[in-house]
Amino acid sequence: MAVTIGDICKIILAVILPPLGVFAEKERCDKDVLINILLTVLGYIPGRCQQTGIRDIYQQSLLNTSFCLRIAQRPV
């Protein structure tokens, strides 16, 4: 999987302020962003750990979705 400029920007945002990284990954403000803001207020490390977990889960779900779409579109 190739790394794009958007991926680099998301990484920089995530390192500077973890809630921005979660927001950039999910592209909406939901409970994960609010939990990350709370954890970041409690300390940078808990917010960073939760952001890394969200990023991994979100990317894994995208990979599974694209894999299922490729199988469904494959000619029989």
Image (cartoon, rainbow, N blue to C red):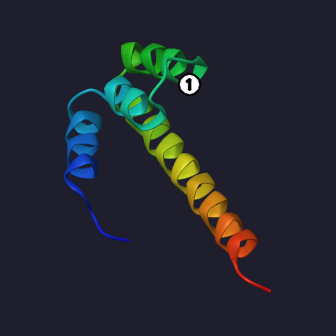
Residue type of the residue flagged with mark 1: Asp
Q: Is residue 42 above or below residue 15?
A: above
Residue ID at (24%, 34%):
13
Residue 22's spot in the image, x, y percent?
42, 31
Q: Is residue 68 left or right of residue 22?
A: right
Q: Is residue 48 above or below residue 40?
A: below
Query: How many residues crowd mark 1 within 10 Å: few (<14), some (14–19), many (20+)?
Result: some
Question: What is the secondary structure assignment of the residue under circle 1?
Answer: helix
Q: Is residue 53 left or right of residue 64?
A: left
Q: Which image quarter: residue 27?
A: top left
Foreground of the two, 47 or 60 = 60
> Which residue is disc 1 drawn over?
32
Q: Residue furthest right?
A: 76
The C terminus - image quarter: bottom right
Residue 56's spot in the image, x, y percent?
51, 52
Residue 62's spot in the image, x, y percent?
57, 54
Q: Which image quarter: residue 68?
A: bottom right
Foreground of the two, 30 or 75 = 75
